[in-house]
Image: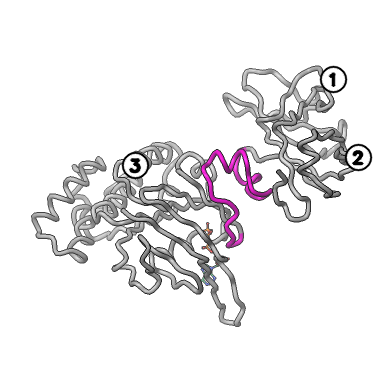
Amino acid sequence: MAELTLDNVTKVFTEDDGNEIVAVDEVNVDIDDGEFLVLVGPSGCGKSTTLRMIAGLETVTRGEIALDGERINEKQPADRDIAMVFQSYALYPHMTVRENMSFGLEESTDMTDDAIASTVEETAGMMGIGDLLDRKPADLSGGQQQRVALGRAIVRDPEAFLMDEPLSNLDAKLRATMRTELQRLQAELGVTTVYVTHDQTEAMTMGDRIAILDDGVLQQVGTPLECYHTPNNQFVAGFIGEPSMNFFEMDVRDGSLRGDRFDYELTPDQREAVGDADRVTLGIRPEDIEVSFEGSDRHQYDVFVDVVEPRGDENTVHLTFDQGVEEPETFTATISGLRHIQSGEPVVATLPPDSIHLFDATTGAALH
Ligand code: ATP
């Protein structure tokens, strides 16, 4: 078990024409011993590059990666005592499950054949693949292959696990089962884990903490609830949560926000947070908007239902200030799936002041 530290880690790729791409830009994060950290962000934000630098599959341009306080930048991948699980499983097709799992141990340890055999059987039992040991990867389902890939990593008893979208080739149901299984296993083994995904739901449900990257830059590191309730900036606010937070750019005038479609009266605390900014972005999550049929409060607005999108236990309602317009601008609210609301219906949307997020309209930084 070990603590993994990334100190100002930067990766610059130089293309053939000399053009430089900063794939990872001064990332700082301390991953605690035994912690499950999820690295999440949109495609191309630098997640895999970060993981590959930790694994030693990519050099570090600047900064330092340390395992338990010891710099590992220059160490060969095989000497790092870190196991990586890939999306593609990367199993050897000509080897049986037993051989796939034993291989790493034969290469990297001086364990006896008997000790290797019993460690492999014990791990396979724990992973529920004990009866598959003599099969080849081609004769296994996707879920079973994934278990073998994980088993192969676990059997090495590494200091840390790195996982790059390990569940993305599985169907939705199996993915959900494997998520829980992986979390249980990780907690049981207590091995420091960095898990990469582009799926914010996966990040929210699996991580002790999540690290959100955009364009190579770390936007926030925190527990899922911290990132959800107190996002550092508009990017994190929009990335975490499904459906996404609604944003309205507004002018600040006389202690209130003035928008194209509605005005919003700020509370004294919000006025203080806004300071002397003259333009801000108001954010509110769909699940924080209350939809009713009448109201008169100053944070309530007469709007119309554009489209109702049933999602089972919940409905996503697309609301608009623009009635009768062909392509109205809409925002979303989440309501109970049991409520009957129809397209075209006039409703009242309440934007409770407690649920409002405010961001600098230029930089996107949260205003607290
Ligand atoms: P995805 O979710 O799509 O896998 P990612 O977040 O893992 O994306 P990376 O694969 O780390 O992103 O890529 C980060 C950036 O670095 C991208 O702009 C990518 O094009 C660039 N990049 C990655 N590898 C190389 C390389 N070998 N040479 C040049 N640029 C690269």
* SS category of the residue bearing label 1: loop
Q: Which residues are magenta?
A: 215-242
Q: Identify the amino acid type marked 2.
A: Asp
First in sequence: mark 1 vs mark 3: 3
Q: Which residue is mark 3?
A: 187
Furthest-bottom residue in view? 17
123 sits left or right of 31 in the view:
left
x and y percentages locating residue 97 in the rendered image: 22, 52
Q: Nearer the viewer, residue 145 or 126?
A: 126
When the figure is inspected, residue 284 is found, relative to residue 141, above or below; the finding is: above
Crowd rating for badge 3 (residues with CA inside 10 Å; few <14, some 14–19, many 20+): some
Q: Which residue is mark 1?
A: 296
When the figure is inspected, residue 354 is found, relative to residue 297, above or below; the finding is: below
Q: In percent of the image, x 43 and y 53: which residue is there?
A: 31
Real-space CA distance between mark 3 and mark 2, rounded to the nearest whole angstrom: 53 Å
The answer to whether the residues at label 1 and label 2 have Cβ atoms under 8 Å apart is no
Q: In percent of the image, x 26 and y 54: which residue is there?
A: 152
- Give the image quarter of residue 161: bottom left
Q: Which residue is mark 2?
A: 254
First in sequence: mark 1 vs mark 2: 2
Residue depth check, mark 3 versus mark 2: number of the one nearer the observer: 2
First in sequence: mark 3 vs mark 2: 3
Q: Is residue 193 visible?
A: yes
Please tell me the numbered disc located at residue 15.
none
x and y percentages locating residue 117 in the rendered image: 13, 53
* SS category of the residue bearing label 2: loop
Q: In percent of the image, x 23 and y 43: which residue is there?
A: 129
Q: Identify the amino acid type marked 3.
A: Ala
Crowd rating for badge 2 (residues with CA inside 10 Å; few <14, some 14–19, many 20+): few
Disc 1 CB within 8 Å of nearest ligand 1 atom = no
- Give the image quarter of residue 253: top right
The answer to whether the residues at label 3 and label 2 have Cβ atoms under 8 Å apart is no
